[in-house]
Image: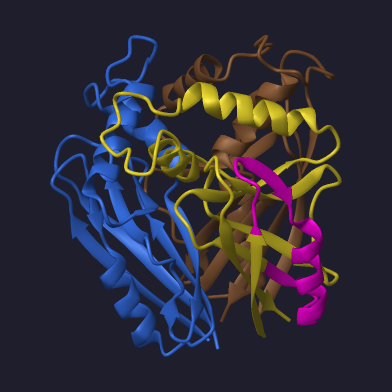
Chain colours: A blue, B yellow, C brown
Amino acid sequence: MVFQQELNFTTSGRSTTNITHQVQDLVVQSGISTGICHVFVQHTSASVMLCENADPDVRIDMETYMQHIVPDGDPMFLHQDEGPDDMSAHIRTVLTNPDLTMPVTRGQCALGIWQGLYLWEHRTHRHQRRVIVTVQGE
Amino acid sequence: MVFQQELNFTTSGRSTTNITHQVQDLVVQSGISTGICHVFVQHTSASVMLCENADPDVRIDMETYMQHIVPDGDPMFLHQDEGPDDMSAHIRTVLTNPDLTMPVTRGQCALGIWQGLYLWEHRTHRHQRRVIVTVQGE
Amino acid sequence: MVFQQELNFTTSGRSTTNITHQVQDLVVQSGISTGICHVFVQHTSASVMLCENADPDVRIDMETYMQHIVPDGDPMFLHQDEGPDDMSAHIRTVLTNPDLTMPVTRGQCALGIWQGLYLWEHRTHRHQRRVIVTVQGE
């Protein structure tokens, strides 16, 4: 059995958005009990991440770390067409991935108790982001 | 066809554990000949990695590199609740991923000759880790 | 329904190769309309990446960034058996992943308009690379 649906989000610029509930709702809607749930961002400057969901400082630190390891506007980059956050956003996306797959067990994504699913916007300005969710199984 | 089973590991603190055989055994048990095998760590401070399996120095170097690029107890981190290896473990997990999918061919994960599947513990102390393996195909 | 096929590439040493068309062709050949497409590199020193496909400078910058963050021949590495690009290639592969899954919609990988699929060779010399493509769905 296959179920597929698109989700649309407007991000508020560089930030993480908890999308766990929206994706879990689609898994319930799919009627699939056992299998996998694939989440895919159709962009090259936003990613999906499983992250600790209890202390918001963890996501602040993730952001601090990324700004440290992939500095915006680094002069080593040739591609700066859309500003200093352009190439850094592409690199952050490759390091943290636009695709993610989770197991489905008893009709839900089988996440650990501290795992939250986040859409991670890497551009500094707001963007419309399309996420495709595919659930497969029985 | 879908097959799903949980594996449990007690890690000895920061280290890699070869789990190739346990996962291959489940694929055989599934009876699935062609498809995919999805491996998922239900935690935010441990990941799964495909890594060179011949020279143990490669995994020592992976560890050295991670300690270099994500220093424990870095003062830039706010989240230090469980010690200096807390936030660094979350970042290592996001960089190296808690999910991994391999093809299944002729009833086995179709790994390259040098590819080994490792559970990577990022906390310095021993932990119980749950890994969910889902095999789908025909 | 499951479809699986091997693709073979000879890379020209450290570089990215656009393999979007070859993989899309296999999805068409599979006859699968809705589902997922899994792409897997059977090696520990090459990866697959979704990257901006319009400006070639983006991939030049990716390479520059990787050389900056994972220097070849870094004296901290023990494993140098096959030269200065040996251990760095393993690390690049773990950071950028040998596996990738895309949704299949209306008989094609549902990529965003700027997403191209690239095989990323991390060794400096030419290599033969095996990529296994598995399409699942209905």
Q: Residue at x 59, y 46 (%)?
A: B121
Foreground: C57 or B61?
A: B61
Q: Residue at x 54, y 67 (%)?
A: C36
Foreground: C53 or B91?
A: B91
Q: Quadrant of the C terminus of chain B?
A: bottom right
Q: Is residue C8 left or right of residue A110?
A: right
Q: A82 above or below A111? A: above
Residue B22: % across, % down: 77, 65
- The part of the image, by quadrant, that contains residue C55 is top left
Q: C132 above or below C65? A: below
Q: Is residue A89 magenta?
A: no
Q: Residue at x 80, y 33 (%)?
A: B56
Q: Is residue C29 visible?
A: no
Foreground: B65 or A92?
A: B65
Q: Which residues are magenta?
A: B10-36
Q: Quadrant of the N terminus of chain B?
A: bottom right
Q: Is residue A31 left or right of residue A60?
A: right
Q: B106 above or below C93? A: below
Q: Residue at x 55, y 45 (%)?
A: B125
Residue B124: % across, % down: 55, 40
Residue B50: % across, % down: 69, 46
Q: Is residue B27 magenta?
A: yes
- The part of the image, by quadrant, that contains residue A24 is bottom left
Residue B39: % across, % down: 62, 63
Q: Is residue A110 visible?
A: yes
Q: Is residue B56 left or right of residue C138?
A: right
